[in-house]
């Protein structure tokens, strides 16, 4: 057990500071004072964070906490904390550790009995959720889907069953393909695509996946997809047979064994039944 009374001990503190996701005015007084008062700011990309620091006239020393030097960075940051320094961790935007580096440093700090304290601010997922018009709870934050179609398809097959509202991060050059896959796998669900939140070109597109798809190719900027959960689309039905489903997965590169296992899981069927159906049909040919 690790019991932390954040403001009632003399241990050093790692502050997890959420920073703007676009609009630089979106910072609290506490964010500014924390960034000014700590001994170091550990940043995902110091070139991004310096813009925020310059804007608010913050002169705290920046150190790097980049994905590509994570182990070295963590060793250095933990060393500085153990010497009694307080450190603020920031990512390029929003909360550190949310689809951004941070989790490993938090775990390492907790191991060493260092206080880990959050300083709240904007987050793209929650911003999109509350403006989506889709049931805000229960929700499940998934973050980025895998870039590879085969893996993305597998992930969507799993997500399809969730009754919770689902929140996804996606990049503009993958959005059309992702929505196409979502349509074919999850059905024509109600979604909201929130892009460029808090910025000049902020836009929220609410509709069914097929409607949003008609404009997806022209969309630019950072975006979040909020997808209604399975219970809001009670009529989600499989538009393919078990055999067609297996063959589709095989075409995507799964072995017949993997495809049978996956189809049984997705359709909530017994693996032996799916196996028998597949092999009976094959032998009949
Ligand atoms: N740590 C961040 C947070 O707390 O939201 C998320 C960082 S993740 C690397 C970046 C992704 O967040 C983008 O690809 C996009 O999906 C989403 N995002 C960030 N800023 C956004 C914005 N202003 N509007 C919409 N989505 C945004």
Image (cartoon, grey):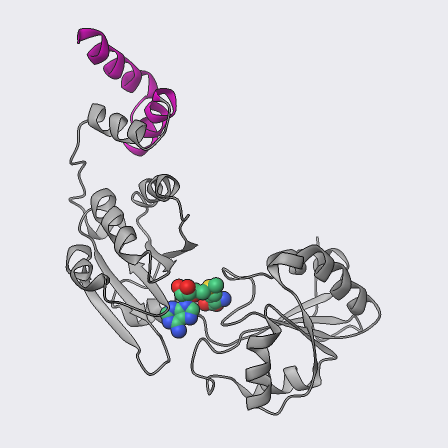
Between 137 and 193, the one lying in front of the other is 193
Q: Is residue 124 visible?
A: no
* Residue 263 location (% of width, % of height): 30, 29
Question: Magenta stretch?
Answer: 256-285
Q: Residue at x 18, y 46 (%)?
A: 234
Assign ligand 1 to one image quadrant: bottom left
* Residue 51 location (% of width, % of height): 55, 83
Taking the image as shown, residue 174 lies to the left or right of residue 114, namely left
The quarter of the image holding the C terminus is top left
Q: Residue at x 36, y 44 (%)?
A: 152
Taking the image as shown, residue 149 lies to the left or right of residue 210, namely right
Please tell me whether the stretch drawn in magenta is mainly helix, strand or loop. helix
Q: Is residue 36 visible?
A: yes
In this view, 126 is above or below 189: below
Query: Does the magenta run of residues contain 128?
Result: no
Between 237 and 25, the one lying in front of the other is 25
Number of numbered discs on residues? 0
In this view, the residue farthest toward the top is: 283
In this view, 59 is above or below 8: below
Between 217 and 158, the one lying in front of the other is 217
In this view, 212 is above or below 94: above
Between 54 and 158, the one lying in front of the other is 54
Query: Does the magenta run of residues contain 281?
Result: yes
* Residue 119 location (% of width, % of height): 58, 76
Q: Residue at x 79, y 74 (%)?
A: 85
In this view, the residue farthest toward the bottom is: 57
In this view, 170 is above or below 119: above
């Amino acid at each position: 057990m690790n019991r932390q009374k954040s403001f009632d001990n003399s241990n050093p503190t790692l502050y997890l500071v959420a920073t703007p996701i676009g609009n630089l005015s979106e910072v609290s007084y506490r964010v500014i004072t924390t960034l000014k008062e700590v001994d170091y700011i550990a940043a995902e990309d110091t070139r991004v964070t310096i813009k925020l620091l310059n804007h608010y006239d913050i002169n705290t020393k920046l150190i790097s906490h980049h994905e590509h030097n994570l182990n070295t960075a963590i060793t250095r940051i933990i060393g500085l904390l153990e010497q009694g320094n307080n450190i603020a961790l920031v990512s390029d935007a929003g909360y550190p550790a949310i689809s951004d580096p941070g989790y490993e440093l938090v775990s390492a700090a907790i191991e060493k009995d260092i206080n880990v304290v959050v300083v709240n601010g904007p987050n793209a997922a929650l911003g999109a959720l509350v403006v989506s018009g889709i049931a805000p709870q229960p929700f499940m934050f998934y973050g980025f889907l895998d870039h590879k179609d085969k893996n993305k398809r597998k992930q969507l097959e799993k997500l399809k069953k969730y009754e919770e509202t689902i929140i996804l991060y996606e990049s503009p050059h993958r959005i059309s393909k992702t929505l196409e896959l979502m349509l074919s796998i999850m059905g024509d669900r109600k979604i909201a695509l929130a892009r460029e939140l808090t910025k000049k070109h902020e836009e929220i597109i609410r509709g069914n996946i097929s409607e949003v798809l008609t404009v997806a190719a022209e969309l630019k900027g950072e975006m979040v997809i909020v997808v209604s959960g399975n219970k809001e689309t009670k009529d989600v039905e499989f538009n393919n047979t078990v055999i067609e489903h297996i063959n589709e997965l095989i075409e995507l590169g799964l072995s017949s064994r993997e495809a049978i296992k996956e189809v049984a899981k997705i359709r909530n069927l017994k693996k032996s039944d799916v196996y028998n159906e597949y092999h009976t049909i094959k032998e009949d040919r």
